[in-house]
Image (cartoon, rainbow, N blue to C red):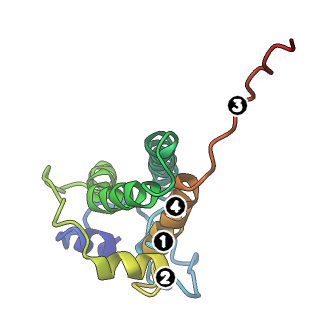
């Protein structure tokens, strides 16, 4: 929890209504210390639902924006959409955290767009070893796959036989 809030420039960890975690429910492994595991079950479910909705929206927008475009333009459109998602999605997550943690101020947490090396780190899974960073990498690859999906060929009626 503190990691996510500090990522947005906030160090507060007040009110654990949905964030209360039983001390006996410790997680160990690659994502030790990940803020997702500091949330209670209700907080985790809410965060998972928010993430799935945002991912589905990103994939849908990617398909809509690339479906009728030439294949050569699709990677560029994907890049703009992926950068936009990384750049703007923290506001959605911060809004969710405001719902579950008391005392977080209403403010914009959107910073500068990601640099090219950050995009590369997400796509190659070489950045932070967090669920958030790895999820963004998976979403980036899914968005690229959706962008590159071929168009369905519609069958045209056969010309009349003479």
- Residue 154 position within the rendered picture, expressed as x and y whole percent measured from the top left: 70, 31
- Residue 23 position within the rendered picture, expressed as x and y whole percent measured from the top left: 51, 77
Q: Is the C-beta separation of discs 4 and 2 under 8 Å?
A: no
Residue at x 41%, y 73% (from the top left corner): 35
The Cα atoms of the two marked residues, 1 and 4, are separated by 11 Å
In the rendered image, which quarter contains the C terminus?
top right
- Give the class, few, some or many, for how many residues have Cα within 10 Å of label 1's Cα (few <14, many ≥20): many
Sequence-earlier tag: 1 or 4? 1
Sequence-earlier tag: 3 or 2? 2
Residue at x 45%, y 49% (from the top left corner): 58
Residue at x 25%, y 76% (from the top left corner): 115
The Cα atoms of the two marked residues, 3 and 4, are separated by 23 Å
- Give the class, few, some or many, for how many residues have Cα within 10 Å of label 3's Cα (few <14, many ≥20): few
Sequence-earlier tag: 3 or 4? 4
| Residue with the most extreme right position | 161
- Which residue does the numbered mark 4 point to in the structure image? 144
Sequence-earlier tag: 4 or 2? 2
- Which residue does the numbered mark 3 point to in the structure image? 154
Q: Is the C-beta separation of discs 1 and 2 under 8 Å?
A: yes
Sequence-earlier tag: 1 or 3? 1
In the rendered image, which quarter contains the N terminus?
bottom left
Q: Which mark is residue 56?
A: none
Side of 69 where 88 appears, left or right: left
Q: Is residue 117 above or below residue 143?
A: below
């Amino acid at each position: 929890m503190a990691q996510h809030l500090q990522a947005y420039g906030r160090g507060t960890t007040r009110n654990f209504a949905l964030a209360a975690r039983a001390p006996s429910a410790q997680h160990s492994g690659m994502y030790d210390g990940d803020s997702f595991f500091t949330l209670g079950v209700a907080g985790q479910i809410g965060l998972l639902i928010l993430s799935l909705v945002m991912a589905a929206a990103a994939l849908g927008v990617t398909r809509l924006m690339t479906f009728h475009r030439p294949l050569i333009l699709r990677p560029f459109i994907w890049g703009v959409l992926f950068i936009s998602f990384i750049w703007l999605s923290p506001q959605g997550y911060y809004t969710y955290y405001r719902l579950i943690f008391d005392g977080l101020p209403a403010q914009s947490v959107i910073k500068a767009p990601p640099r090219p090396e950050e995009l590369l780190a997400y796509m190659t899974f070489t950045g932070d070893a967090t669920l958030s960073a790895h999820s963004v990498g998976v979403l980036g690859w899914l968005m690229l796959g959706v962008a590159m999906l071929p168009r369905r060929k519609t069958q045209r009626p056969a010309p009349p036989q003479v």
